[in-house]
Image (cartoon, rainbow, N blue to C red):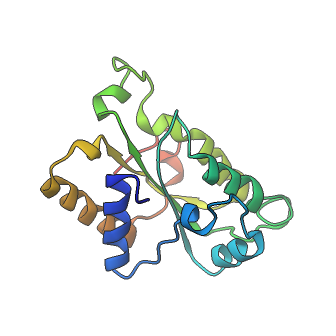
């Protein structure tokens, strides 16, 4: 979190609002995830937030490993269903502006379309997928804009709800 101006600002604002923030890179710098501990943390909450910088159309390596290690069959799916009906929120930051995530832009695909693998995981583990919070090129924002974005993030964390079924094919974003 500390290496990203945007993610640091968002996480700090969330913490100041009394929201628990767990930085898995700080917790597991050796990439040795305490699976039992993480499962307990997830099971004990109603709302799960993955906040991360969007790298090469995906999540950072440790977050992917976290999913692979923690969201296994017989715990998260295939009868396990340990976090079924928990709300799952994604908060991502990009290096490119929103215009780059358009059909005419350099990435071609819309930002929310690139989150489909997370939505598929959500479907498998039966969590309630919420409208994602996407911060486009905020690392270039002024301090005032970044502060406003951080406050918008806190508001989002406190009010976001699951996507209605009819909206799932056309993902919205905050």
The residue located at (56%, 39%) in the rendering is 58
Q: Residue furthest front?
A: 30
Q: How many marks?
A: 0
Q: Residue furthest top?
A: 104
The residue located at (42%, 36%) in the rendering is 111
**Viewed as shown, does residue 166 lie left or right of 148?**
right
Closer-to-camera residue (87/68): 68
**Viewed as shown, does residue 34 lie left or right of 97?**
right
Image spot of residue 166 (x, y percent): 50, 47
Image spot of residue 62 (x, y percent): 63, 52
Image spot of residue 171 (x, y percent): 46, 43
Residue 14 vs 65, above or below: the answer is: below
The residue located at (62%, 41%) in the rendering is 117
Closer-to-camera residue (36/134): 36
Image spot of residue 48 (x, y percent): 55, 67
Please state, as top left, top right, bottom left or bottom right, where the N terminus lies in the image.
Answer: bottom left
The residue located at (56%, 45%) in the rendering is 59
């Amino acid at each position: 979190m500390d290496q990203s101006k945007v993610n640091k600002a968002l996480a700090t604002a969330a913490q100041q609002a009394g929201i628990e923030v767990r930085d898995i890179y700080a917790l597991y710098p050796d990439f040795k995830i305490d699976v039992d501990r993480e499962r307990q943390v997830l099971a004990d909450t109603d709302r799960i937030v993955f906040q991360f910088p969007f790298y090469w159309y995906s999540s950072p390596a440790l977050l992917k490993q976290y999913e692979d290690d923690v969201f296994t069959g017989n715990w998260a799916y295939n009868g396990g269903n340990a976090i079924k009906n928990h709300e799952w929120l994604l908060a991502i930051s990009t290096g490119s502006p929103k215009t780059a995530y358009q059909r005419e832009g350099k990435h071609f695909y819309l930002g929310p379309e690139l989150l489909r693998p997370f939505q598929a995981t959500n479907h498998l583990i039966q969590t309630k997928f919420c409208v994602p919070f996407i911060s486009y090129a905020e690392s270039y924002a002024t301090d005032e804009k970044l502060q406003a974005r951080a406050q918008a993030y806190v508001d989002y964390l406190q009010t976001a709800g699951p996507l209605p079924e009819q909206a799932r094919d056309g993902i919205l974003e905050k």
